[in-house]
């Protein structure tokens, strides 16, 4: 018995996944709302076209049987159509918060249309034995709105039972049996159609939601992958000790800026720096203090070029490199002066330096406008040459290249 009951319930009640229920119902109600507004306008337009034609055909003789009943029913349906249209227009303005009211309005309007179709058909049966209006109404309810099959059953069953009871009193005996058979088969078919449409709509909605969820998951994975790639890229371009760029990033940026400055015929400056007597500092203060010294120098260098478009990188050991695109020799010289000034102000003690009681830097600077006759490797080599020239002559100094900006050195 329970199996039979469950089977019957399964026919008329199609379960909606709980997580989709709210969104699915909202979509169905909104779709029904649109279709019912359109249907109301179409029926009103039909009424406005047919009524004048019938009045002319009947020569205004509308107060005789059965026309009086027809006119009364058509007047009622016109009032209901207008009322339903404006109610739905009002509810549509805040559809998200009026879903239950929209559902109730559509359900009530659908039930009224079925009752109206049955009443018109009862009059038609009395005159001509036809139930065409009822058939059209039942078919329209099956194909226009989307309802749970149980709702379709609740709408169809009372009206159809009423029509079956009234048919023997109004239908001609010759077609009564045929009308019984045809209308009952029609109801079964319409409930089946309503069920298939609802299930198809639910399946389509569920598939769309699953696809959307998969797309969201894919987007999330892509974002995580992108974030991971950025982190990996940052790791590969960042010096672990100081947090500034490493030599890989220095070389990559130099090639990029070289090409850009060559196209725009702009100056490109490279500054190479290292800490004076750093070996003595490391040997006497220890490697931990040496690492901290390198970190402090890195912070000072980064701060000194923060207002430029350049970068600072740890080139290796106690050596640093600075790239200053679109920076003239004079501007670069001012930046190096600021670096030396900051280093002096910071005052990192270095009792084992032969030139100062504090940590000092030596640097070499080279500025050039890139051309086809020069290469990226040469600009670093020349800056390095200036740096080591400085260290050879006297530490805690800077050497600025004496080459012309368009030198073919």
Image: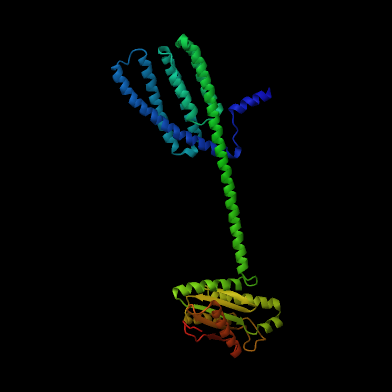
307 or 10: nearer the viewer: 10
Q: Residue furthest bottom?
A: 393
Asked if residue 119 is positioned above or below residue 245 in the image, the reply reads: above
Examine the rendered structure and indicate whether residue 210 appears above or below residue 126. Answer: below
**Farthest-out residue, top:** 173
- On the question of residue 175 being in view, the answer is yes
Quadrant assignment, res 278: bottom right
Q: Quadrant of residue 6?
A: top right
Residue in the image at 50% along x and 72% along y: 259
- Residue pictured at 40% horizontal, 24% vertical: 77
Instruction: Give coordinates of residue 321: x percent, y percent.
Output: 57, 77
- Residue at the (41%, 26%) spot, across then down: 80
Q: Residue at x 44, y 37 (%)?
A: 92
Q: Nearer the viewer, residue 344 or 327?
A: 327
Task: Return the residue nearer the eye: 214 or 111.
Answer: 214
Residue 152 picture location, percent across and down: 53, 26
Residue 307 visible here = no
Position of residue 385 relative to residue 228, above or below, is: below
Image-based side of 12 in relation to 77, left or right: right
Q: Quadrant of the N terminus?
A: top right
Q: Exactly how many numbered labels are in the figure?
A: 0
User: Picture coordinates of residue 199 (x, y %)?
Assistant: 56, 33
The chosen color scheme is rainbow
Q: Quadrant of residue 70?
A: top left
Q: Position of residue 86 (x, y in %)?
A: 40, 32
Taking the view exactly as shown, the residue that stands out farthest to the front is 373
249 on left or right of 48:
right
């Amino acid at each position: 018995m329970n199996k039979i009951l469950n089977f019957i319930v399964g026919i008329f009640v199609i379960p909606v996944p709980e997580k989709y229920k709210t969104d699915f119902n909202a979509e169905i109600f909104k779709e029904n709302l649109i279709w019912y507004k359109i249907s109301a306008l179409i029926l009103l337009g039909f009424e406005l076209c047919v009524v004048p034609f019938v009045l002319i055909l009947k020569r205004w003789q509308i107060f005789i049987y059965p026309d009086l009943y027809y006119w009364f029913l058509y007047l009622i349906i016109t009032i209901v159509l207008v009322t339903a249209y404006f109610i739905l227009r009002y509810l549509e303005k805040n559809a998200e918060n009026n879903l239950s009211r929209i559902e109730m309005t559509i359900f009530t309007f659908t039930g009224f249309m079925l009752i109206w179709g049955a009443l018109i058909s009862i009059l038609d049966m009395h005159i001509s034995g036809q139930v065409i209006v009822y058939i059209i109404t039942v078919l329209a309810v099956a194909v226009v709105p989307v309802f749970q099959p149980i709702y379709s059953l609740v709408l169809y069953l009372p009206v159809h039972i009423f029509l079956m009871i009234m048919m023997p009193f109004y239908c001609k005996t010759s077609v009564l049996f045929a009308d019984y058979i045809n209308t009952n088969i029609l109801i079964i078919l319409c409930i089946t159609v309503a069920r298939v449409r609802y299930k198809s709509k639910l399946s389509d909605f569920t598939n769309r939601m699953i696809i959307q969820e998969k797309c969201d998951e894919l987007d999330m994975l892509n974002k995580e992958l992108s974030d991971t790639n950025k982190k990996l890229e940052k790791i590969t371009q960042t010096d672990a000790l100081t947090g500034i760029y490493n030599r890989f990033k220095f070389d990559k940026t130099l090639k990029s800026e070289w090409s850009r400055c060559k196209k725009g015929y702009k100056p490109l400056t490279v500054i190479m720096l290292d800490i004076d007597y750093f070996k003595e500092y490391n040997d006497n203060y220890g490697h931990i203090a040496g690492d901290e010294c390198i970190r402090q120098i890195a912070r000072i260098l980064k701060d000194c070029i923060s207002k430029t478009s350049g970068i600072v990188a740890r080139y290796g050991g106690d050596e640093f490199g600075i790239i200053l695109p679109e920076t003239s020799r004079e501007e670069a010289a001012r930046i190096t002066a600021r670096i030396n000034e900051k280093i002096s102000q910071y005052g990192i003690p270095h009792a084992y330096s032969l030139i100062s009681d504090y940590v000092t830097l030596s640097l070499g600077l080279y500025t050039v406008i890139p051309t086809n006759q020069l290469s990226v490797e040469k600009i670093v080599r020349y800056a390095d040459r200036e740096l080591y020239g400085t260290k050879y002559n006297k530490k805690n100094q800077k050497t600025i290249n004496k080459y012309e900006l368009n030198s073919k050195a």
